[in-house]
């Protein structure tokens, strides 16, 4: 028995020039454009930031893919060292006392994407995913350097700690308690990243640095 055919006209809710017309499309766009937006509407489910960096994209990507550099440009991730699991390493998130953070880096050199899969307290399920991409600025801005994007999605565990028994103390705040500050905090860190890459590139210095201790790459 063959499946019934379907066309775009059968799908409710599509807004296209074929069914809306130029004036209606413009009206829809104007309706969605506001001078002021509530914080939860902009940053409630996703947090994306971006920055131009005067550093060659290949060098920016190579810096990001090496996980130990998180100790340089993030505000609070420190003391990373290899664990017994290949590719998984652990450090401290000094945002909260006695808090361990686990991380694995998944990088794609062709697309120049670097994804940090992380979690507090345990390394079995790395649910805090930081998605980064380096784009050659020549392609998108017609100038040398890089455009770096960074996106976080609000996993349900940000709202509900899946392993409360692993916290170092019962009153330790949870990482999700900081979600409303993610945009501001990540903006500070992106500025750190920009400052480090541009300083070293303009000074003809090595972009990367050696890890302070043995780190699984």
Image: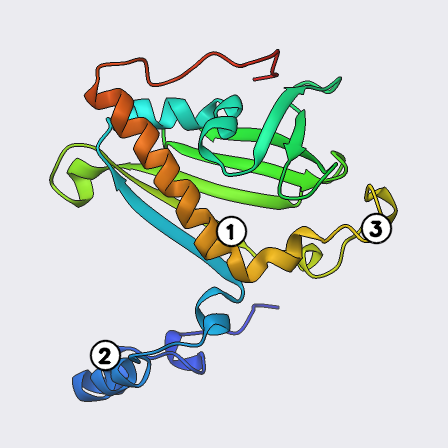
CA gap, disc 2 to disc 1? Answer: 32 Å
Check the image and report above or below for 69 versus 119: above
Q: Secondary structure at mark 1?
A: strand
Give the mark toward the camera: 1 or 3: 3
Q: Residues within 10 Å of mark 1 (few under 14, many from 20)?
A: some
State the image coordinates of residue 79 (x, y, percent, origin top left).
Answer: 62, 24
According to the image, what is the colour scheme of the structure? rainbow
Mark 2 vs 1, N-terminal side? 2
Q: Secondary structure at mark 2?
A: helix
CA gap, disc 1 to disc 3? Answer: 22 Å
Residue depicted at 15% across the width and 44% down the height: 141
Q: Which mark is residue 152?
A: 1
Give the mark toward the camera: 2 or 1: 1
Q: Quadrant of the C terminus?
A: top right
State the image coordinates of residue 8 (x, y, percent, origin top left).
Answer: 38, 75
Give the mark toward the camera: 3 or 2: 3
Instruction: Place residue 77 in its image quadrant.
Output: top right
Q: Which residue is mark 2?
A: 17
Residue depicted at 57% across the width and 68% down the height: 2
Q: Quadrant of the N terminus?
A: bottom right
Mark 1 vs 3, N-terminal side? 1
State the image coordinates of residue 145 (x, y, percent, origin top left).
Answer: 20, 32
Q: Residues within 10 Å of mark 3 (few under 14, many from 20)?
A: few
Q: Which residue is mark 3?
A: 164
């Amino acid at each position: 028995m063959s499946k019934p055919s379907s066309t775009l006209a059968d799908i409710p809710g599509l807004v296209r020039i074929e069914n809306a017309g130029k004036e209606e499309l413009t009206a829809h766009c104007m309706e969605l454009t506001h001078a002021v937006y509530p914080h939860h509407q902009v940053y409630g489910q996703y947090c994306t930031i971006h920055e131009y960096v005067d550093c060659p994209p290949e060098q920016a990507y190579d810096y990001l893919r090496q996980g130990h550099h998180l100790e340089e440009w993030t505000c609070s991730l420190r003391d990373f060292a290899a664990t017994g699991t290949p590719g998984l390493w652990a450090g401290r998130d000094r945002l909260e006392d006695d808090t361990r953070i686990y991380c694995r880096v998944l990088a794609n050199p062709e697309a120049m994407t670097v994804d940090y899969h992380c979690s507090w307290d345990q390394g079995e399920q790395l649910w805090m995913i930081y998605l980064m991409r380096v784009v050659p600025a020549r392609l998108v801005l017609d100038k040398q350097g890089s455009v770096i994007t960074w996106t976080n999605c609000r996993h349900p565990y940000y709202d509900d700690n899946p392993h409360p028994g692993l916290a170092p103390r019962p009153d330790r705040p949870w990482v999700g308690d900081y979600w409303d500050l993610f945009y501001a905090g990540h903006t500070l860190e992106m500025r750190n990243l920009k400052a480090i890459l541009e300083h070293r590139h303009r000074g003809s210095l090595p972009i990367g640095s050696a890890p302070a201790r043995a780190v699984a790459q």
